[in-house]
Image (cartoon, rainbow, N blue to C red):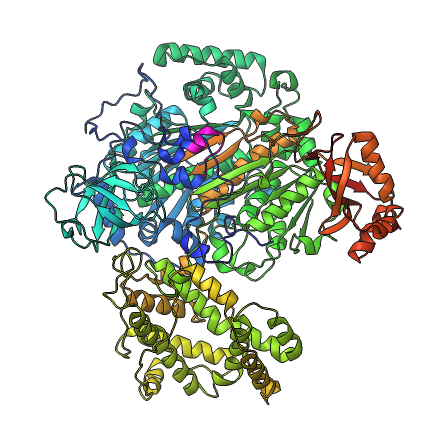
Amino acid sequence: MTSSPSASPLQHHNHNHILNHNLSPSKTKIHSNLINGQETENNQEERLNPKRMKFSESIENINIEAQMDTEIIPEKLETSVQILTTNNNIAPNQTQSTNANSTNMSSVNSTNSTQRQQNDNDEHPEIDEALYSRQLYVLGHEAMRRMQASNVLISGMGGLGVEIAKNVVLGGVKSVTIHDTQNVSYDDLSTQFFLHENDIGKNRAQCTQPLLAELNPYVPVKVLDLNKNLTTDDLKNFQVVVLTQSSTQEQIEFGKFCHQHGIKFIVTETRGVFGQIFCDFGENFEVVDVDGEQPLSAMISAINNDAQGIVTTLDEQRHGFQDDMVVTFSEVKGMTEVNGQEFKIKVFGPYTFGIGDTTNFSKYMRGGYVHQVKKPRLMNFKPINEAIKSPETLISDFTKMEDSNTIHVAFQTSYLFTQKHSRLPKPWDQQDSDEFIRLARELNDAEFKYELNDYVLRLFSSTLQGQISPMHAVIGGTAAQEVMKACSGKFTPIYQYFYFDAREILPEKPFESLNSNECSVDETDEAMRRYKSQVAVLGRKFQSKLGRSKYFIVGAGALGCEYMKNFAMMGMCTSNEKGQLIITDMDTIEKSNLNRQFLFRSHDVQKCKATVAAAAANKMNPHLNVVAQTNRVGPETEHIYNDAFFEQLDGVCNALDNIDARIYVDRRCVYYQKPLIESGTLGTKGNVQVVKPFITESYSSTQDPPEKSIPICTLKNFPNAIEHTLQWARDNFEGVFTNPAAAALEFIKNPDAYVERVMKLQGSQPLEELSQVFNALVNDRPKSFEDCVRWARFHWQENYHNSIEQLLYNFPRDQLTSSGVPFWSGPKRCPHPLNFTTENPTYLEYVYTAANLKAEMYGIPQVRDKSRVIELVSKIEVPAFKPKQGVKIHVNDSEAQNAMNSGSVESDQLEEMIEKLKNVSDLKNVKIQPIEFEKDDDSNLHMDFIVACSNLRAENYDIAPADRHKSKLIAGRIIPAIATTTSLIVGLDCIELYKLIQGHDKIDLFKSSFVNLALPFFGLSEPAAPKKSKYYDNEFSLWDRFEVKGEMTLKEFMDFFKEKHQLEITMLSQGVVMLYSFFMDKKKLAERLNMPLSQVVETVSKKPIPKYVNALVLELCCNDAEGEDLEVPYVKYVLPERN
């Protein structure tokens, strides 16, 4: 188990990493018709099963441009404080409104663009890539620089305000100024994680400022005048203003001012189980990158001369383009008129699209690439006094989309109620709710004329006074991302309202279960008073239930830190009688973690994540009963996380970053029938899956499609993309600096055992392995740094000159295939050899880094002086290369695999190599150490080598090189991450956690969530139910099993199933051990039939059953009464108590 940078699933250790470094989070299914608003060939299959759609085929491919109207909004907008009667327009496809005016930017002069240019020229510190590395892969350098020129004001330091401020400070803006005139009270302690009981009576902003300032040394945090309310004069020096606790009058006053002065304006608020965000980024707001996705590209196989100009791409993978995208072409032979030109396209299929009339173009011959051209867009926002009259809304849950109007009116009514009564409605008070509904209907009749939902209005009024931490995480994480969009122009903003509610966390019959008495807390009640705001929503009994919970969090990275914060605020696991939180993570804190794992500080680097996170959460809530552990969760720790451990739990929260660990924990939860909350993030994307026994499927029930791997021959001889050269560079690093040294150490430790293991390999592999060790110990073993430079220079020559000359000798540039097609066409790019010179900095960088790494590998002092390396390499004579005849170069993977597995090696060759190895005389004196690749240490030369190695390979094949930043992302297999998404996702996780603790057993009360803050997109849908199977008339799912208690002999066990269940056991196994089969030797069967089953297991496996194991899992193959095979559940065989 490893901790989560942002908890995206592990990309397995193969070449899939490099091809698919932009992986979507695991288990990302969603209703296809709710995403694209149309049916395409790509989603017809998903439409047959509307509960599921893969994230990668949905959220990443939403065509925002097609959903944005290009109608220009008049520059002069009527302004009026009074709300007029208009229609409420809800954006039908979940993204931007038809009035968003998103036009392509070729030459548009706007106040916004001018301001951004000025901001770009402001002085700002260099970007600390060690700190911001994961976020940089989400936002990019340009967006980060714009953020560093932005000053942000956040008014209101309650739970929502501090959540936004936390994420914005971590994000790295120029400065954050906070404002609040209120003092700390018990109402704050269940949501404001930087406030404590000893702060009560002090100003909230003043108490919060020092703790916010600790989060990021590059972002000064200031406090605005504490003694006065906010005025328009206070706003002038900020690029973004955020209000978190404000009235309608304040929103309109400040909103008009900000709109007129080019200041981005955000209003956000949570009330009980309801939350809202409003955005006004002014007129002609430039969205530099609407979705943050890498531009698409594809290889071309044909372009016809036609009125539609049909382009066909190679069928290796779908092109992914959509109607009205703009593309350009390169390296097209024949129809050269398309090269470098831009075309708006129409998609005809997954491998075809049209570019318009090509009848007058030259005839297409071969080759070429098509690339998406991403265009900036403009958006025009209405000021809040305009938008409030006819709100356009981003939908978060399509099952409740008709309630957006009601929620909009409810928020406006809350201000009216407060204005009239100088207070908020009392929690769950019938009289106040009646008054609230009356005011809402009066407002609606006068201003809106919507159809209102009285039930929603009553829920709103009843929970209005309360606040809950997960709601602040959801709304705060989303709002903080909007702040970053406002600063940078990166990603599409919310246009203009966003409403979210979590009413499902309430009891199924809330008005019967909750009342004013149940949901109020006296401040003398020491056990409850810090949860006063949460009790106002959920009641005292539920609060006690939270405290008695016993939960296990697996992972203390980004997700784990957010879980700890929310658990502390919610009062989870706080009861001295039963409540307990166990968190485990084997990792230690690194500098790159500090940008999003907000419980850690710079002085915590190298400390254990779980220990530090637990201590930080205890500071937030001293009543939290937390146990921090440093164990990996897996088969090797089942003596710790055993039957007794899991059986005591109420549930598990995964905060993991790899699929294998997720699957393992999921299977344990299924076995012990425990709820699991599973989630993951990838940049601005995230997903949440709640797993409830017997109600939903499990995490492992469905798998994402297999990742497409890079063919071996493509890597070795025919690369056509920078991902290929970077994977080749990684393989080169491990094949030169890691694997030979590791094998040599294994041989030195025990030569006979090593040779015995290697000789069991297939084909030519034994000789290759033994030769690798011999070279490491003899042929390639340097005695001095001069030897290392010589080796590096020859290695350069072999990789970038000799091997290419040999390849072109085998396959000349003009060679044709058997079908008459040029061999060097399609995905095969014709290479050219490189000629070494120290004048080329990349050539020299390769030799410099390779020589120093070689020296490190053999314990030789490094030389970090490049002039000395130039001096040494200039003296080296490299013989001219002459291609060899008879060298076999494999064209496809099947050839290569067959050769590797069946390659014949003469036995005398093997014996000779073994003899050579045994005759190496000074094994004890060999100093050799494998170098494990580490991407985040800029001083170790690892990434320097990778970048040079890859870009030289790219130069061989005329592939555009990659800079260090991009190379590190791809070769380092980095999962992009940002604090905003993590905050939002764990907020959604904890909303599902409330439902589990409520004991809900209706599947439609739970939500699987899929979000992409870049678009922005929210998709909440009902989880999938577990698949049902049947034997006889008995229905069962993965959650069911036979449970047998007490020891039985094998015969008694088989008779029991035959008599009680009418099942004849034909085979019985435990793990990989076969205990019984119908074809078993009769003598062996006779021995086992009268043995106790536990003894049979120990006898056959030749291992004792560990004492911590209370039950065995037995798998059955059975026949029914007619002798037909049946699928049946497994057996949980409960062992008798043992001493």
Q: Position of residue 804 (x, y in %)?
A: 32, 71
Q: Position of residue 629 (x, y in %)?
A: 67, 53
Q: Nearer the viewer, residue 295 or 395?
A: 295
Q: Nearer the viewer, residue 305 or 263?
A: 305
As drawn, 675 above or below 462: below
Q: Is residue 179 visible?
A: no
As drawn, 555 above or below 423: below
Magenta highlight: main SS? loop
Tally the numbered discs.
Answer: 0
Q: Is residue 418 left or right of residue 1039?
A: left
Q: Is residue 114 visible?
A: yes
Residues shaded magenta: 45-54
Q: Position of residue 15 (x, y in %)?
A: 45, 58
Magenta stretch: includes residue 274: no
Q: Position of residue 7 (x, y in %)?
A: 52, 48
Q: Identify the residue at horizontal 46%, vertical 33% (top origin).
A: 30
As drawn, 1107 above or below 543: below
Residue furthest toward the left? 360
Q: Identify the residue at horizontal 45%, vertical 37% (top origin).
A: 1011
Magenta stretch: includes residue 51: yes
Query: In the figure, residue 68 lies in which quadrant?
Result: top left
Q: Nearer the viewer, residue 695 or 775?
A: 775
Q: Nearer the viewer, residue 794 or 366?
A: 366
